[in-house]
Amino acid sequence: QVEVVESGGGLVQPGGSLRLSCTASGTIFFANAMGWYRQAPGKERELVAAITSNGNTKYADSVKDRFAISRDNAKNTVYLQMNSLKPEDTAVYSCNYGSLRGDNYWGQGTQVTVSS
């Protein structure tokens, strides 16, 4: 069993920055990936960024030059640094933990609102 806990959401003005954190605890498999997804009202959930346990990353085109994902394997924690935020980045951001043995766990989600 794995628990996924996110933190760091909030309200920020356009052009501002936020950092999200996500920690997975429990029985962590060495070969895993953690990622951030977001869902805005009336839209489907989409992948924002993901990172594997060996450091490979993937980004949505819409955030590639503004967001950066990183991880601390010793803490089973991933970070999403979001810069130059836009109103269209407003969504509930959820963290996912998955592994090669079939794990698939989600956090509760954190609201990010970009508004003046």
Image (tube, grey):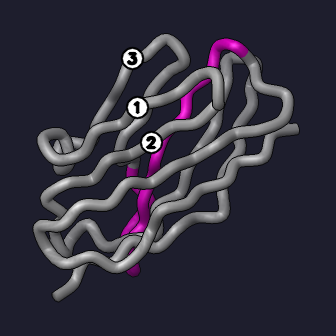
Q: Please give the residue where the numbered disc 2 appears in the rendered image.
A: 79
* Residue visible at 81% across and 39% down in the picture: 2
Residue displayed at 35% across by 24% down: 57
Question: Residue drawn at (40%, 31%), measured in percent from left and top?
Answer: 70
Percent from the top left, x then y, of residue 11? 34, 79
Q: Residue at x 16, y 47 (%)?
A: 66
Image quarter in which the N terminus is found: top right
**The disc labelled 3 sits on which kind of residue?**
Asn
Question: Relative to residue 35, is residue 38 depicted above or below?
Answer: below
Helix, strand or loop status at disc 3: loop
Relative to 25, 115 lies left or right: left
- Give me the C-alpha separation between circle 2 and circle 3: 14 Å
- Marks 1/2 in contact by CB < 8 Å: the verdict is yes
In percent of width and height, residue 95 lies at 55, 49
Q: Categorize mark 2 by other alpha carbons within 10 Å: few (<14), some (14-19), many (20+).
A: many
Q: What is the span of residues highlighted in magenta in the rendered image?
A: 30-46
Q: Residues within 10 Å of mark 1 (few under 14, many from 20)?
A: many
Residue beneath disc 3: 56
How many angstroms separate mark 1 from mark 3 (CA)? Answer: 10 Å
Q: Earlier in the sequence, mark 1 or mark 3?
A: 3
**Residue 64 falls left or right of residue 77:** left
Q: Nearer the viewer, residue 76 or 95?
A: 76
Query: Quick one: SS at disc 1?
Result: strand
Q: Find numbered disc 2 in the image and state the secondary structure of the residue it sits on.
A: strand
**Label of residue 70 in the image:** 1
Mark before the other along the chain sequence, 1 or 2: 1
